[in-house]
Amino acid sequence: MAFLDQALTGQVVGAILFFLLIFIVGPKYMVYKYIREIEEVAESLEDYAREAKGVIVKTARGRGAPAGDPGEAVERAMDFFLIPPVDLDPYGILRKIEHLLDEAEAMFEAVAGEIAPQSDPVWRANIVSLLKGGVGLNTIAKMVRHFVELVKKTNNLQMAMMIQMSLPLIKKVAEAQRKGVDAIAEGKPLGDGVGPLVVAQMMDGGCKTAAKDVLCYEGEMDGRRVLFLKAEGPGAKLGKIGEGVRRVCEGREISKIITLDAGVKLEGERTGKVSEGIGAAIGDPGPEKAKIEEVAVNMNARLEAYMVKMSVEEAISPMTRDIGEAAQRARELIRKGVLAVPEGSTVVVVGVGNTCGIGNSRGEVEGLKLPEREEEKVEEGLLDRVIKGMVSKPGRKKDES
C-alpha cells in the first residue's frame, strides 16, 4: 500500500512539474530568450545608425568645409518623418504626394547646404542621399528598439516570436543600407543605378536639361530618332523623370516609351537577369510614374519595360560585376525594341535609378570597376548538418520509353 501511495505521489508531483515547465517556466524562458536576441539586433542597428551619422559628418567636413560642427544638424535630419496626405477622397492625391515629396527633398537639400556649404553640386547631391540613408537606418533601429521595449513591458510571447522571426530579414536590409551609405560616401555606383548606367552607355554627350535633375540626349538608331533620359550624374540623384518624359514628348509624335530599372528578383532567380514586360518600370511613389503613363496614353504610344533583376539588398548596396554585365544584355533588348518601330519614328528610352557614381555619357562610364558579388554564407550548426545529411535528395524520375 505504501508503495502505491509513493507511486501516486510521484505521479502527482511529476504532473505538477510538467505543468509548471510547459505552461509557466517554458514560456517565460522563451520570452526572455527572444528579448535577448531582439535586443542584440537592436543594439547592432543602433550602431549602424551611429556609424552612418559619423560617415555623413565626415563627408560633410571633407567635402563642404562647414563653419561649425555639423553633428547636431545631421542628428535632427535623421529624425525626419513624412506624414502621408489624406486619401479618403482620392481626387488630387498624386499632386499632394508630389508636393510633399518636393518639400521633403527641399528640406534635405537645405540641410546639405547647412552642413556642407562649400560642396560642389555632385557632392551636395551625395550628401542629400547620405542623409536619406541615415534616416532609413535610424528609423529601422528605432522601430526594433520600440518592439524590444514593448515585449519587455508586456511579456507577450506571441509578439516576441513574430519579431524574432522577422529579425534576419530586418538585419539583412539594414546591413545592405549601411554598405550603401559607405558606397555613396565614396561616390561609388549602387545596384539601383543600372538603369542610368545602361542609358549613359548609349549617350555621346551634348545633353540638355529636360526637368529638375534630368538630362536628355537626342540620338539616332538606324533611321529612328531616340530620346535618351536619365537623372544627372555622377551625383546621387533620381530626378523628376516623369516630368522630363512629359516635357520632351510635348509637340512630338512618340511611337514608344521604353523604361529600364532595377527590379526585385524572387529567391532562386539569378542576379543580373534581364526581364521584359509592359508598363512603366519606375519605383516611384506614384507621381512620376503616372506622368509617364499619361503621356503614353495620350499619344497611344507603346509602353515597354525592362528590369535587371536583383535583391532589395543588392539594389541599395554597391553595384557588383554581374549587375554591371547585365547592361550589355539590356542594351541589346533596348536596341531590338527601338528597331521594332518603323523608320522615321521617335522612341523615348528612360534609365531609372540612382546616378551615384554614374556619369552622363559613354566616355564617363567606360572602365567602371565593379567588385564581385559576395556569396551568401548560411551558418549551420552540427545538428543541422547531421539532419540535413540524413535527408536524401529526391532523384528525377527517368522518362519511360
Image (cartoon, rainbow, N blue to C red):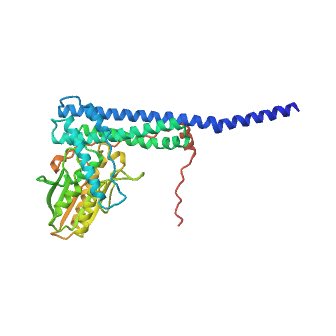
At x 14% / y 59%, what residue is drawn? 218
* Of 249 and 338, the residue lying toward us: 249
* Of 227 and 81, the residue lying toward us: 81
* Of 221 and 47, the residue lying toward us: 47
In this view, the residue farthest toward the top is: 68
Q: Is residue 265 above or below residue 23?
A: below
Asked if residue 225 lies left or right of residue 336, the reply is left
Which image quadrant for residue 318? top left
Q: Is residue 25 above or below residue 278?
A: above
Q: Is residue 307 visible?
A: yes
* Image location (x, y in percent) of residue 288: 26, 57
At x 15% / y 69%, what residue is drawn? 344
In this view, the residue farthest toward the right is: 1
* Image location (x, y in percent) of residue 265: 37, 53
* Image location (x, y in percent) of residue 365: 19, 47
In this view, the residue farthest toward the left is: 206
Q: Is residue 194 visible?
A: no
From the image, which quarter does the N terminus lie in?
Answer: top right
At x 34% / y 46%, what residue is drawn? 314
Q: How many circles with numbers are drawn on the protein?
A: 0
* Image location (x, y in percent) of residue 44: 40, 33
Asked if residue 79 lies left or right of residue 209, the reply is right
Asked if residue 160 lies left or right of residue 108, the reply is right
